[in-house]
Amino acid sequence: MKLVLALALAATCLTTIPAAAQQAAEADTAAATRSGVAFTQPKDWTAQVRGPATLLTAPEGTLTIAVVDVGSAANAQAAAAQAWAMYNPEANRTVRVVTAGNPGGGWDERVGISYETSPSERATVSASALRKGDDWTVVITDGSEAVASMRMAATSLIAQSLRPAGYREESFAGKTAHRLTPDRIQAMRDFVAQSAEALEVPGVGYALIDNGSVVYQGGYGVRALGSTEPVDEHTKFMIASNTKGMATLLLSVLADEDKLRWEQPVTDLYPDFRLGSDATTESTLVRHLVCACTGLPRKDFAFILDDPGAPAMETFVGLAETEPTSDFGELFQYNNLMASAAGYLGGMLAYPEMEVGAAFDRAMQDRIFGPLGMPDTTFSFEEGESGNWARPHGYDLDGRMVLMSNGFNHLITPHRPAGGAWSTAADFARYAQLELGKGLTPEGERLVSEENILERRRRGVPLGENAWYGMGLMERIVSGVSVITHGGTLQGFHSNFYAIPEAGIGAVILTNSDSGASMLGPFLRRLLEIAYDGEPEAAAEVAAAAGRLKAQAQARRERLTFPPDTEVLAGLATTYRDPEVGSIEFTEKDGVPWMKAGFVEGPVATRQNADGTVSVVSAGPGIISVDALVGALPDGTRTLTVRESQHEYVYTEVP
């Protein structure tokens, strides 16, 4: 029986964890709280019942997720306060932001609460309050930020599997999907328009596929705020990490040409390849480059903070300096440098005499984009940023949607197999058709063998509940239906594609604002609703997301001092440098204090942290900013420390 069905059964069919027991699960295990709320205990996590709280603790012992049966409460915040008193009465956390979620999954109300933490804690602390009828269940996440990042799939599994007692999930399994008739296509078009308006997305390019054919392709809105130029099916967007699936498609073609095997050591093909230690290097197979299962942390700041102009070979330099933080095949950990190395390996094998970046670009054009009929898909920023192209947008510090420079996104150039492609709705739809056709182009010509295109979808490391990462592709079981998918995120650009093989339905969506990320999940939900007569939930998801984005923007503004604290600015050096990445510089631009750190730049804001420390923050528009902790070494040398979940960079002042 599938896990999704097992979780839908009444709580009496689930394991109730004994009080005071600490049990490490040998596999993902369906369980329930005393009140019958269902959840899944992840493999290797221990569980303990303490009164109304069920505590799930990661193997490292430094991250706990508490599922607390609260019962009745006046509202979500009151329920969260009661849950904290039951879980840890000595905790005294200050609420940072409260955001309403959308009902669904059996819950009548969902509310998210995040709490203030100090930089020294390196902690993640949040609560999710879920109401069914008069009763509240609160899920508290409390512990190490690094472990939460490393075990993201397990924390997602817990959150996604929480369901009220007796709830039966909607399922489309075994149902025949409706064809995308004109009225159903119009329903999708209406949804895109309404969602873009609600989320302030200036422009959307999208396409719908049914029974092997594109039944709609076009756009909504404008390429840039302040312009009347419309988005259409030929408008170019950056597709970010959706490039990964295309790069692994190149590897599939090369496997057909007997230039590589999935189980072959990378060093057989590229002897200079290095990944941390010698033992790790020797263990790395071609498949490991794109499986997100080797235990490498993201370290995205390594290239976000890098100085411009790095060559393609910088990908391999970064990998040589990185060691996995978990065993191969143990955990999902997404790493862009590995995917970049996979694409460049393909370029080397196709054109060994060329520079590695140029070889990759040519291999993708000759073996993928050209044969598949994708004339507007490119890795060239000169081509991408010309003619019919969508400009990126994001929220500014005051929560207004504004046009942004695309300069930040140039950071992907040295690592472009991981996310540097430009494409259009029309081009991207042909890629989705190839996936649905199992290697056949829309014209019925064989581009890649069925065996090797499907190998990319083979279920690998789990992502959460009923979700797995393959090789540059994900599979999710959504309401009993298999969906092949991947997303893409850069500053101001968010995209996704979906293939539903058993229904013969597919779709692509490209957006030109950071708020567009909140359209992607509801877009799939609405497609499933239309295809299978599902309960209408997508519109509520969009409405909840719109409110959440506004609340988060307001909370960010309230935490920052802008214009910045002049005393803090006076104490800063002009230039700081970290030998691993590059420099942070402070100047003035049009009379405004300005901060530049690698590819991130913007006006300076300051923040007083909960532990009394001070941070300087780049306060430009968009989802990416640099938050640097002001400090000093014992000898008085001034420092700035930039942290990501599993790594930190310490910049020292340049005399």
Image (cartoon, grey):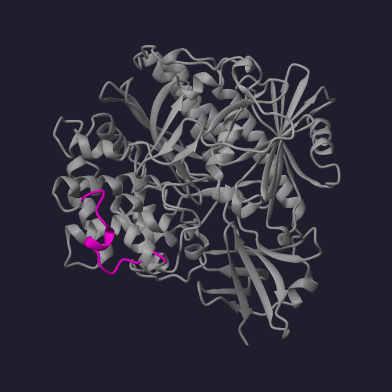
**Residue 266 magenta-drawn?**
yes
| Residue shown at the point (42%, 48%) measured from the top left | 293
Q: In the image as oriented, which residue stretches furthest toward the bottom?
A: 655
Does residue 324 sit above or below 520 in this rendering? below
Does residue 88 sit above or below 68 in this rendering? below
In front of the other: 88 or 74: 88
Region rendered in magenta = 261-276
Where, quadrant-wise, is the C terminus in this rendering?
bottom right
Does residue 545 sit above or below 326 in this rendering? above
Q: How many marks?
A: 0
Q: Position of residue 481 (x, y in %)?
A: 41, 22
Q: Quarter-wise, where is residue 362 in the image?
A: bottom left
Where, quadrant-wise, is the N terminus in this rendering?
top left
Q: Which secondary structure is most common in the magenta stretch?
A: loop
| Residue shown at the point (29%, 47%) measured from the top left | 248
Residue 387 in view of the camera: no
For this view, does 154 lie left or right of residue 258?
A: right
Q: Position of residue 58 (x, y in %)?
A: 62, 45
Does residue 58 sit above or below 31 in this rendering? below
| Residue shown at the point (67%, 71%) measured from the top left | 591
Q: Position of residue 629 (x, y in %)?
A: 69, 67
For this view, does 394 lie left or right of residue 217?
A: right
In front of the other: 101 or 146: 146
**Residue 223 magenta-drawn?**
no
Q: Position of residue 95 (x, y in %)?
A: 79, 44
In front of the other: 362 or 253: 253
